[in-house]
Amino acid sequence: MAALTASPSSAAKAASVAASLEGQGINKGRAAVMMLVAVTLFACLDSSAKMASRELPAIETVWFRFAIHFVLVALVLNPWRAPEAWRTKQPRLQTLRALIQIVCTGLNFLALSQLQIAQTLSIQFTGPAFITLLSIFWLGEKVGRYRWTAIGVSFLGVLVITRPAPGSIEPAFGIILLSVIIGASYSIMTRRLAGTESPGSMLLIMAALPAAILTPLIPFVFVWPAHPETWIALFGAGFFGALSHYFYIQAHRFAPASFLAPLQYFQFLAVLILGFVFFGDIPTLWTFAGALILIGSGLYIWHRERVIARRARDEVSRSDQ
């Protein structure tokens, strides 16, 4: 999945939108299928971006990804059918969020051109840790020793994957880690916007603003794709980007985020298959080990958040008695 693109951390960009749609009828079976489809499509997005980035500048791939996404969503959420989707109550925050999204997505696509998809996704599994850290400063949340431990374990997982040594670490690992850090700030902004913006507006603007901001730059960096498969990859990036977020949001209509969150890690299996089929990638044992550590850490953070939320509900219930 890319924050901003296709990863669990990048999928968080739709999480708050989806949260506002919860409670419209619980159907966990349907929700689970939709979530698995969504994360598989996120993996397809990453694969398309990697394929296109082998020939084209990352900024061009980013522009195609958002421009096509915008066109597809605009056809559904047109001004006559969904006028509220074309309005925003916080234009400044939306613009800042779009700028962050451009940088984050560009860094992710740049890293994808140099690393295996499984490697970039594994590093992106640190997303919950960075979101937890930023929530302390931006949202005033309190983090206990258990989640601090899980955050520390997350960084251990990164060390296992990158195996840093003097002169041996791949710079692309730093690029994707920076993308995750920026993506965490994007996720916090999305939480804030979800309180005032409509779901349609969030879905449309997340593609419209990046496409509009990048359009004036494209004539100066545009490279005409020389191969048909590159064109297919470019259109695939936009198509999979739009469709993956649609299924992600729909999944949250039928089940709460607490049920769906662990299913996001199915994306790792999807990228393993796609990476092998399209690029011949075979991840190392270090990548597998680090990914397992990061997945375990992410699941534990998710578990602790559920425990804290349950305690808060119990306290409110007791105070009402």
Image (spheres, rainbow, N blue to C red):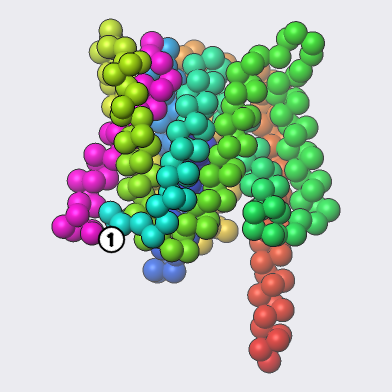
Q: In the image, is residue 70 above or below residue 235?
A: below
Q: In the image, is residue 58 above or below residue 21?
A: above
Residue 217 at x, y percent in the picture: 34, 23
Asked if residue 29 shows in the view, the reply is: no
The chief SS type of the magenta part is helix
Q: Identify which residue is drawn at 32% across, 22% down.
A: 218
Q: Which span of residues is magenta-colored?
A: 55-84
For mark 1, what is the residue?
84
- Label 1 secondary element: helix
Per the image, is 71 magenta? yes
The crowd level at tag 1 (other Cα within 10 Å; few <14, some 14-19, many 20+) is some
Residue 160 at x, y percent in the picture: 75, 25
Going by the picture, which residue comes out furthest to the bottom? Answer: 321
For the residue pair 131 and 245, the one nearer the viewer reads as: 131
Q: How many marks?
A: 1
Q: Identify which residue is drawn at 43% across, 41% down.
A: 98
Decide if residue 114 is on the left or right side of residue 288.
left
Asked if residue 98 shows in the view, the reply is: yes
